[in-house]
Image (spheres, grey):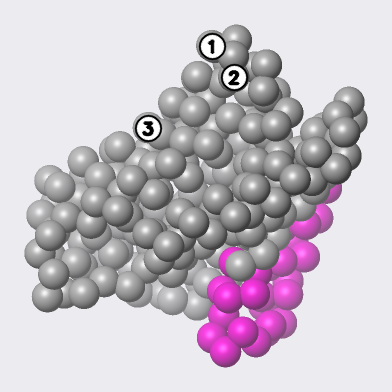
Amino acid sequence: MTYLLLIMSVLLSYGFVLLFNPKVKELLQLLLAFSGSFLLALTLFELVPSVYENSDGKTMGLYIMLGILFQVFLEFFSKGAEHGHIHYDASRSTFPWLLLVSLCIHSFIEGIPIAKHQTILYGILVHKVPISLILSVFLLNSGMSRTAAGCFICLFALMTPLGNFLATSFEWIRNYYAALTAVVIGVFLHISTVILFESSEGHRFTFRKLLSIAAGIFIAYLL
């Protein structure tokens, strides 16, 4: 069921864009703000306490910082696609391999914490929907064929379940689970905070955006 939810969240988002070609930018920005606060809150409520529970605090802090730096490195190639910033050049006809690889790496490591923290699954699902919508719009408006776009989306959809599968199946990953989770925390912290501060025009916090952020935090706390 976990794998199915992760895959369908991406595929259904792509199908929605394919069928309806949505143009409602404000609603998408509100969904981004909600997903950012929801993911941030779940990270702080669930993941952060777990990695500090039986580990050296300074070491875990170092891994978290490495996660932040790793995500910054990935965004050098993805141009911020992980938090909803994708700009396409209609004149380019080459397949965006760097975007694909960086997004797949990001999506893969997202699946690691799910092995022991099912609650974070909801944060990842809510995060994937607006990102998948934006990514689908980008692919379909970039001049790429629907076949290539569909293959891109399918590969992207499979990466988080793959990360979760490996984390639950291989002992060497389980042995370093706390350190890997700390790296993922850094990734989530970077992405969610960037979403919160950049998901509106001019970096202004409208009342609707504040409500979306508050709702994300409140629902995450209830979980």
Give the amino acid at mark 3.
Leu
Question: Residue sitting at 46 percent across and 54 percent down?
Answer: 74
- Asked whether the beta carbons under mark 2 and mark 1 sit within 8 Å of each other, the answer is yes
The mark nearer the N terminus, 2 or 3, is: 3
Q: State the residue position of label 2.
A: 173
Question: Residue sitting at 47 percent across and 36 percent down?
Answer: 108
Q: Give the class, few, some or many, for how many residues have Cα within 10 Å of label 1's Cα (few <14, many ≥20).
A: few
Q: State the residue position of label 3.
A: 158
Q: Is residue 163 above or below residue 22?
A: above
User: Magenta part of the protein: which range?
Assistant: 195-223
Residue 89 position by quadrant: bottom left
Q: CA distance from mark 2 to mark 1?
A: 8 Å
Give the amino acid at mark 1.
Ser
- What secondary structure is the stretch in magenta mostly built from? helix
Closer to the camera, 63 or 193? Answer: 63
**Left or right: residue 218 compared with residue 139:** right
Image coordinates of residue 1 in percent, x first then y, are 51, 22
Q: In what element is the residue under mark 2?
A: helix
Image coordinates of residue 146 in percent, x first then y, are 14, 51
Q: State the residue position of label 1.
A: 169
Q: Is residue 137 above or below residue 59?
A: below
